[in-house]
């Protein structure tokens, strides 16, 4: 029986180990898809809110003093509030740049694509009776180890919830 080293552990290339890797490949792929969608949704929602806020604040800068009076605010107080809220919007946009939700969505998309290729390899190699052909254990285990090493990790804080979501499907 051959073996390989993965994350400083020696693991036997047995049929049971290949079954485990196959199961984890499907789970990890689903997790990366969920994280891709999650970060993409966050980024889209935040961008829409920021754009809408920017348009509203831009339009109110051209408003007449009668507009502020209609809202029950003095012109001076309105301009101070407008300036503070516009500064808060700008600060929010800087924070969103640091959070980099579109970048996180892209890295999870890339990871999902890589995990999908490994899943296809496993599916193509698996026999109809659910067993693994002799002699391909090293190839499958190496592909699994490589994708583990070369993709972004699932965040620890999100792992249990994503695993539960996967098993609920």
Image (spheres, rainbow, N blue to C red):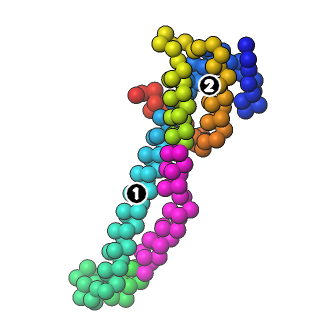
**Relative vertical location of residue 98 with respect to residue 17 in this rendering, above or below:** below
Residue 48: image location, x then y, percent = 37, 62
Residue 28: image location, x then y, percent = 53, 33
Q: Which residue is located at x 49 percent, y 10 percent?
A: 129
Q: Which residue is located at x 52 percent, y 29 percent?
A: 119
**Relative vertical location of residue 67 with respect to residue 158 in this rendering, above or below:** below
Task: Determine which residue is flagged by label 2.
Answer: 140
Q: Does the magenta stretch include residue 85?
A: yes
- Let me know if residue 161 appears in the view: no
Q: Closer to the camera, 131 or 8?
A: 131
Q: Which structural element holds mark 1?
A: helix
- Separation of residues labelled 1 and 2 (CA atoms): 37 Å
Write the start and end of the magenta stretch as one range.
Answer: 83-110
Residue at the extreme top of the image, as rendered: 129
Q: Which structural element holds mark 2?
A: helix
Residues under numbered marks 1 and 2 in contact, where contact means CB atoms less than 8 Å apart: no
Task: Determine which residue is flagged by label 1.
Answer: 44
Mark 2 or mark 1, which is nearer the start of the sequence?
1
């Amino acid at each position: 029986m051959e073996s390989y080293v993965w994350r400083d552990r020696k693991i036997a290339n047995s049929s049971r180990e290949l079954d485990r890797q196959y199961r984890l490949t499907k789970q990890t792929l689903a997790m990366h898809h969920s994280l891709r969608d999650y970060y993409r949704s966050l980024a889209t929602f935040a961008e829409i809110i920021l754009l809408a806020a920017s348009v509203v604040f831009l339009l109110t800068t051209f408003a007449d003093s009668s507009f502020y009076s209609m809202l029950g605010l003095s012109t001076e107080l309105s301009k101070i509030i407008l300036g503070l809220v516009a500064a808060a919007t700008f600060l929010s946009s800087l924070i969103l740049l640091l959070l980099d939700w579109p970048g996180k969505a892209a890295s999870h998309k890339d990871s999902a694509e890589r995990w999908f290729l490994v899943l296809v390899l496993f599916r193509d190699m698996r026999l109809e009776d659910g067993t693994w052909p002799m002699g391909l254990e090293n190839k499958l285990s190496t592909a699994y180890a490589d994708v583990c090493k070369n993709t972004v990790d699932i965040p620890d804080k999100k792992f249990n919830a994503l695993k539960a979501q996967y098993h609920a499907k």
